[in-house]
Image (tube, helix red, strand yellow):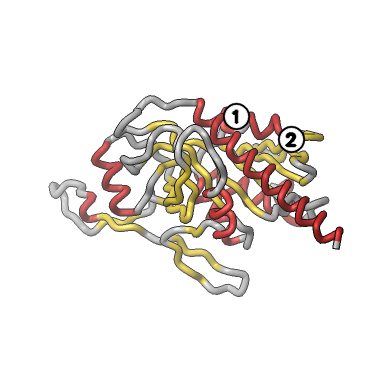
Amino acid sequence: MRWLLAILLTAPAWGAEFLIQGAVDWELQPLVSALQERREVKIAAWTFWTGRIGGHDVVISRTDVGPINAAAVTALAIREFHPAVVINQGTAGAHNPDLRVYDIVVGERTVDYGAFKSQPAGRGQGSDSARWSPIPHQIRDANGEVSQYAAFPGDPAWVARAAAQPYQHGRVVKGVIGSAYEYNREIDRILWLRKTFGSDTEDMESAYAAGTALAMQTPFVAIRIVSDSEFSHPQLERKAGEYGAEFVAQLVAKCCAAKAAAAAGRGAR
């Protein structure tokens, strides 16, 4: 573990404006392709690509799948690259029956729907989700105070920017992005998760990246595109990964252009 200690004790060489995450390559390719001056960086188990979009420093992170990967790589990337914002993006299954494939959900909140406790039940009484209730996460702040989080808030400014971004393949809506190391295909369970946790979508990374970013005092937003829905389109569509990554690339480019224009305006005065 000496490599990890060395990383955590070493100051970053530069600070990225954006850290953009995706779990797998087919959720990342349009973003990696958009990077100018691209350079691949490998740290332990994880791969990053550094470069520039619109003249601004960007890091693309392949988190790989699941909560262990998501939390570890988010902490590592924040410490190493000091991003101004973390954008976790990729595909998701629908918990909201009204969502359609290729709709995009911008996370006003992210929630871990795999965290719950059950009430006591004896042998032969079976397992009944009616006896289950959510467990909030506990995170200690820099002052040592512990707070409980039933869900992690998305950065309001970035939620607003993403929700206003034009998109041609479906709707863009604000909502609750759910995460757990699960792939749910039972409609009754999906409806229970939505009722219990308020989730609109499910993935395996967003909430864990969000909690890590919150603990490390870094703005965060999750943006997830629906790739499948047991209610209307159970087949997973990989094209959604491409559309979602393109949406985020356009969002970043637009933000960079707006900041450059604002800076030019200040210079003119």
* Residue type at the position of mark 1: Asp
How much space separates mark 1 and mark 2, taking CA atoms? 15 Å
Task: Count all numbered tags in the image, as a single digit.
Answer: 2
Residue corresponding to mark 2: 35
Compare marks 1 and 2 and give the one earlier in the sequence: 1
Q: Residue at x 47, y 41 (%)?
A: 104
The vertical placement of 231 against 96, above or below, is above
Q: Is residue 154 visible?
A: yes
Name the side, left or right, on which 108 lies relative to 87: left
Q: Position of residue 38 (x, y in %)?
A: 78, 34
Q: Residue furthest left?
A: 124
Q: Is residue 5 visible?
A: no
Residue corresponding to mark 1: 25
- In the foreground, 97 or 128: 97
Tag 1–tag 2 contact (CB < 8 Å): no
Q: Position of residue 237 (x, y in %)?
A: 45, 26
- In the foreground, 255 or 115: 255
Question: Dot 2 lies on which element?
Answer: loop
Packing grade of label 2 (10 A; few <14, some 14-19, many >=20) is: many
Q: Position of residue 128 (x, y in %)?
A: 20, 49
Q: Position of residue 122 (x, y in %)?
A: 16, 54
The vertical placement of 13 against 29, above or below, is below
Depth-wise, is mark 1 or mark 2 nearer the camera?
2
* Residue type at the position of mark 2: Leu
